[in-house]
Image: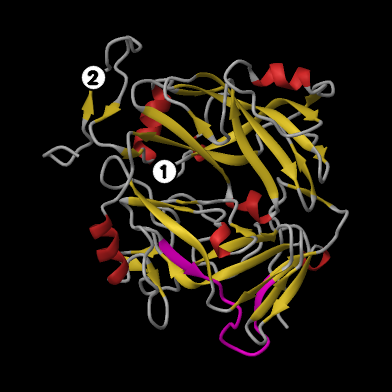
Amino acid sequence: MNESGTLGFVPAGEGEPASNVIKYKETGIIPYQGIKALVAEKMVDGLPQIEEDQFQPASLDLRLGSRAYRVRASFLPGPNATVMDKVKQLDGMPAISLGLDNGVVFEKGAVYVVELAESVHLIGDYMGFANPKSSTGRLDVLTRLITDHATAFDRVEKGYKGPLYLEVIPLTFSIVVRQGTRLNQLRLQRGGSSVALTEIQRLYDGGQLVKVTGKLPPLRDGLVPLTVNLKGQTAGEIIGFRAKKNSSKIDLEKVGFYDPREFWEPIVASDGLLNLDRNDFYILATREEVGVPPNLAAEMVAFDPASGEFRVHYAGFFDPGFGWHGTGIGGNASGSRAVLEVRSYGVSFTLEHGQIVGWLDYKQLATGQTQVRYGDTIKSHYQGQGVALAKHFKPWPAP
């Protein structure tokens, strides 16, 4: 921000489009108001036009386009090929037409590549990062953004101009999608986004990032540890869910529609131990209430082999304002726990109550605070959550 408290912009640089392209003086993740400005300048464009409810506090929802391809295997195109070059090389089946009304089934275990409705023209120091939306991860649907000439998933490199594609792999349930279905999000960033270690320590010690009963474990290189809740507060409390081996498909446009008992088995608090069976999928929650101040965002470290042979949290991005009410975590309301989407790989693994299962990496926004916080004016399904299934399910029946 400049001295008047307004957003600070500088003119477009040499070689950039002739229009007054907006560039932030500060570095960090671009917030809601900045994303809207960059969309207006066509740095991010859409066909059809980007809709108002795609804008999130520090990210933009991306939409499936009109064509998808089923391919033999996951891939990255590499520096000398486009995504469509690789689709053809992998003998991708004829294009699947995604309509606006009639849904198309993406089968469990199959790999699909979908053209997205959005494209980008990044200039200067801007880059992009992507992650699944919360509901996508809670259905165990692996999604990864791919660009032409990409050597890594979920990254849009500086200077990239072109289409965006999404790899979609349903791992537990078959899903029904349409043109316009939103499975992932794009974050835009200028320069670095690190927060000073002293500031993270101050916020952590002051209870501004997590709130939990008992002693806080130490930070690790500025990362905030999160621990798993396997005991609950009362006997017989549901502390998680395990996905059933179910052949039913889930239509992603149907909210609050499905009976969760057809798809999930409840996990009830007992001795504080949980055996993660190999390749099963679990929904658990943290002991901590998590908060993201409105001038920061946070990202979950998805897989840390030092913690064990399991992965948590596909949807690794926490918008500014998550779990935040007024001036702190929860305020006068209950806070929000981080929901953990857990899958054990290779071997079965036993989790213990209070075990560290993930790390939050807090990042600075480019312009002070976002004008829109998670859970305020933007509808947010998971503010104030405990252990929660995806929005497509009805509430779990009371005992």
Secondary structure under the numbered disc 2 in the rendered image? loop
Q: Amino acid at mark 1?
A: Ala
Q: Residue furthest bottom?
A: 235
Q: Residue at x 57, y 51 (%)?
A: 315
Residue on which disc 1 sits: 58
Q: Is residue 384 or residue 131 the one in the foreground?
A: 131
| Magenta highlight range | 224-240
Q: Is residue 3 or residue 149 the one in the foreground?
A: 149
Count of numbered circles on the image = 2
Q: Position of residue 205 (x, y in %)?
A: 29, 71
Q: Residue at x 64, y 28 (%)?
A: 76
Counting other residues with Cα less than 10 Å from the Cα at mark 2, is it few (<14), some (14-19), or many (20 or more)? Answer: few
Q: Amino acid at mark 2?
A: Pro
Q: Is residue 50 left or right of residue 319?
A: right
Q: Residue furthest right?
A: 247
Residue on which disc 2 sits: 11
How far is disc 2 from disc 1 in space, using C-alphas?
A: 22 Å
Q: Is residue 225 magenta?
A: yes
Would you identify the image quadrant in which residue 231 lies?
Answer: bottom right
Q: Does residue 315 lie above or below 75 as drawn? A: below
Q: Is residue 197 magenta?
A: no
Q: Residue at x 81, y 44 (%)?
A: 109
Would you identify the image quadrant in which residue 31 lies?
Answer: top left
Would you identify the image quadrant in which residue 159 lies?
Answer: top left
Which of the marked residues, 2 or 1, is nearer the chain's N terminus?
Answer: 2
Q: Is residue 241 left or right of residue 39?
A: right
Q: Is residue 392 left or right of residue 150?
A: right
Q: Position of residue 301 (x, y in %)?
A: 50, 54
Q: Residue at x 32, y 13 (%)?
A: 19
